[in-house]
Image (spheres, coloured by chain):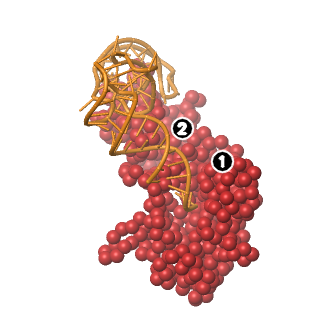
Chain colours: A red, B orange
Amino acid sequence: MNAPWTAIKDLPSAEGQEVTVKGWLYNMRSSGKIHFLQLRDGSGTVQGVMVKQDVPEELFVVAKGLWLEASVEVTGMVRKDERAPSGVELTVTGLVVLQNPTDEYPIGKKDHGIDFLLDHRHLWLRSSRQQAIMRIRDRIIWEARSFLHDDGYLLVDSPILSGAVGEGASGLFELDYFDEKAYLAQTGQLYAEAAAAAFGKVYCFGPTFRAEKSKTRRHLTEFWMLEPEVAFYGHKENMDLQERLVCHIVARVLEHCRPELRMLERDTTPLENVKPPFHHLQYGEAIDMLHRLGSETPYGSDLGNEDETILTQQFDRPVFIECYPKKVKAFYMKEHPENPDLVLCDDLLAPEGYGEIIGGSQREDDYDRLLSRIREEKLPEEAYDWYLDLRKYGTFVHSGFGMGIERVVAWVCGLQHIREASPWPRTIYRLNP
RNA sequence: UCCUCGGUAGCUCAAUCGGCAGAGCGGGUGGCUGUUAACCACUAGGUUCGAGGUUCGAGUCCUCGCCGAGGAGCCA
């Protein structure tokens, strides 16, 4: 049975046939008696060639009057052509104009500033570069989920609205929830821990929100986070899972997204290197290395952005930084068995200066120690009743991590700024479109 | 929140020491039978972010404000 129209990506296999394509006119050139209609339908692009002497006069005139991004239905013969990027062109015999814009299309062929592009994000997404990024984002998410699914993980989503505060009150979006305060989730982890006690191997995946007023190329106020949580996994098994997941994602992107990576002019050599084993540095080793390289970050402090960049430049693949000082990390992390000033945690830093893509830890599973950490941090004890219950009814060694999807997309795509990794980026001064 | 930079045509940007506001793209008109950000010719297009100030004269200097970007801290 014939489909009523054909996707542009399928045209190479329809050579010699007359087909109809539905899409948009993303550019047009004309040489007097030949129009070259550049068509786009979301699946691909193709050039429609309309020769004046081969079509009715009025059709040629209609085509000439098309504005960019007109929606059209084009009928033509699929013809092999060496000059075409996809190998085929369409010899146009019919054209139905679905809608011809009455204004010029705002996004031109020359460069635009970032402010203008973000104001026109709804149109910017149509450009080939943005299409490539979104296809790679889709691939990364798809592969992350199938990897976990195939390894026996259960998706147990966490709430977006919450009354309890995850990691401390700063950076939370607060809103009215009938007669009480609610907060937008900044992590699903605490819920994932509860789910792990129910199902063993779980993950949650959803949007998370940070109200911090950060203005950098690696921050969004809304971003998607993948958070596996595994019962009876310790610190080491946790890092091993992270390594396998990241390697799987990168390998599959290289396998399926070559055209997109080429469009982005991404040098794939650093991605080819993403294979086990990743490098590991203990926090103290990282500080020593940084001091040798000229950093002045004192032992005991968290690593700065510049520090992370310096460190990743020393390695040809992602690097784990393990066991940070307790005082710079969250209350729920498991105390190091050999050094009570440290915790069993890890940050995974992507190469080429992209920095932290994963933060993970073994969780504190001792009731009394967790409670005293909550008190030390002056967190509202009553909000953690249910979380403490997990340590009361069959406590268990468990570990997990959070992977920021946009950070991974930015790294894999080689983007200068994380905002291009999200279809609708939310930053401190930008809520629309 | 702090530091730095910027705001000139629809868009991207020029404008020397404070001295006639200019180019490319896009638009319009015409030309071109293989264009690839097509090309060629002509053409229209301006409250130089706003409010004050200095000056014979301000896009340019000063003050305040608004908007945006880059970075820091924090984090994924």
Looking at this view, is B66 or A139 the one in front? B66
Which residue in the protein does label 1 denote?
A: A352
Residue A195 placement (x, y as % from top left): 55, 78
Q: Would residue A210 be seen by someone viewing this image from the given angle?
A: yes
- Residue at (74, 57) in percent of width and height: A288
Q: Is residue A238 above or below residue B37?
A: below
- Residue at (59, 47) in percent of width and height: A413
The amino acid sitting under disc 2 is: Glu
Looking at this view, is A117 or A250 the one in front? A117
In the rendered structure, are the residues bearing label 1 and label 2 in contact, judged by CB atoms less than 8 Å apart?
Answer: no
Which residue in the protein does label 2 denote?
A: A15
Q: Is residue A199 above or below residue A402?
A: below
Residue B57 placement (x, y as % from top left): 30, 20
- In the image, taking residue A267 as reference, residue B5 lies left or right, namely left
Local SS, label 1: loop
Q: Residues within 10 Å of mark 1 (few under 14, many from 20)?
A: some
Residue A191 placement (x, y as % from top left): 52, 75
Q: Residues within 10 Å of mark 2 (few under 14, many from 20)?
A: some
Q: CA distance from mark 1 to mark 2?
A: 43 Å
In front: mark 1 or mark 2? 1
Looking at this view, is A396 or A248 the one in front? A396
The amino acid sitting under disc 1 is: Glu
Q: Chain of mark 1?
A: A
Looking at this view, is B34 or A336 the one in front? A336
Q: Chain of mark 2?
A: A
- In the image, taking residue A160 as reference, residue A338 lies left or right, namely right
- In the image, taking residue B60 as reference, residue A133 lies left or right, namely right
Residue A245 placement (x, y as % from top left): 65, 62
